Image (cartoon, rainbow, N blue to C red):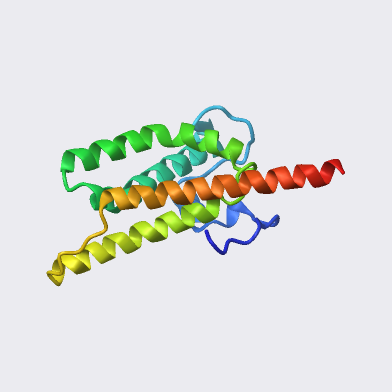
Amino acid sequence: MLFEKSESKDYDPTDNVLLKLFRKIMPVTNEPNLNTFFVKRDNKWYATTFFIVLLVIEGSDLIFAVDSIPAVLSVSKDPFIVYTSNIFAILGLRSLYFALSGIMKYFYYLKYALAGILSFIGFKMCFNEFCVQMNYGLEISNLVSLGVIISLLALSIVASLILNKKGMDEASQ
C-alpha cells in the first residue's frame, strides 16, 4: 500500500488464474447483462459473469475475515469476541467499502495512514509476543495502540484537507 503505483489501464480480468481454473471446472457464458447465476444453452448449464462477480465478492469477504483474525487476537483472547467481531466485519464490509470509495478522492494520504496502521499492528503483535516469550514484562497496551491509530488517521485526514484546500486555492487563482 505504501509504494503502490497508479492503476494500470491495460489490466485484463480474464487473465486471472482463479478465473481460468473456474472456467475449466464449469463453462462460463460471455453474454453480458444476465441477471441470473446460471443459464441453460443447448442442454448445458453455464455460469454467468454475474455468478463469478458474486464469487469474487464473497471470496474477498472470506479473505478479509481470515486476515483480520490475528488483528482481533492482538486485542482480545476471548473467542466470542474474535468470532462475533469477524461476523460483524463481514456484514458491514461491503457497505463500508462503498462509503469509503466515495470519499477516498478527498483523503489522498489515507492509504499511507492505513499502511502505517497495519505495520504498527503487526509490529505490536510481534513485540508483545516476543516480550512474553522472553519474560521481559513489556507490552504495547491497547490504549497506546488506539492513540497511534487515531493519530495516524487524524494526521492523514488533516494533511489531505490541507492539500485539497491548497489545490483549490491554486485553482481559483
- Residue plotted at (33% across, 63% down): 123
For the point 47% across and 31% down, the residue is 95
Q: Is residue 154 left or right of residue 6?
A: left
Q: Quadrant of the C terminus?
A: top right
Residue 157, percent from left and from top? 56, 45
Q: Position of residue 129 (x, y in %)?
A: 21, 64
* Above or below 100: residue 151: below
Q: Quadrant of residue 134?
A: bottom left
Does residue 135 sit above or below 156 in this rendering? Answer: below
Q: Where does residue 14 sit, x and y in percent of width and height?
A: 59, 52
In the rendered image, the vertical position of residue 102 relative to residue 140, given as above or below? above
Q: Residue at x 23, y 62 (%)?
A: 128
Q: Is residue 28 left or right of residue 83?
A: right
- Number of labelled discs? 0
Quadrant housing residue 85: top left
Identify the residue at image location x=12%, y=69%: 135
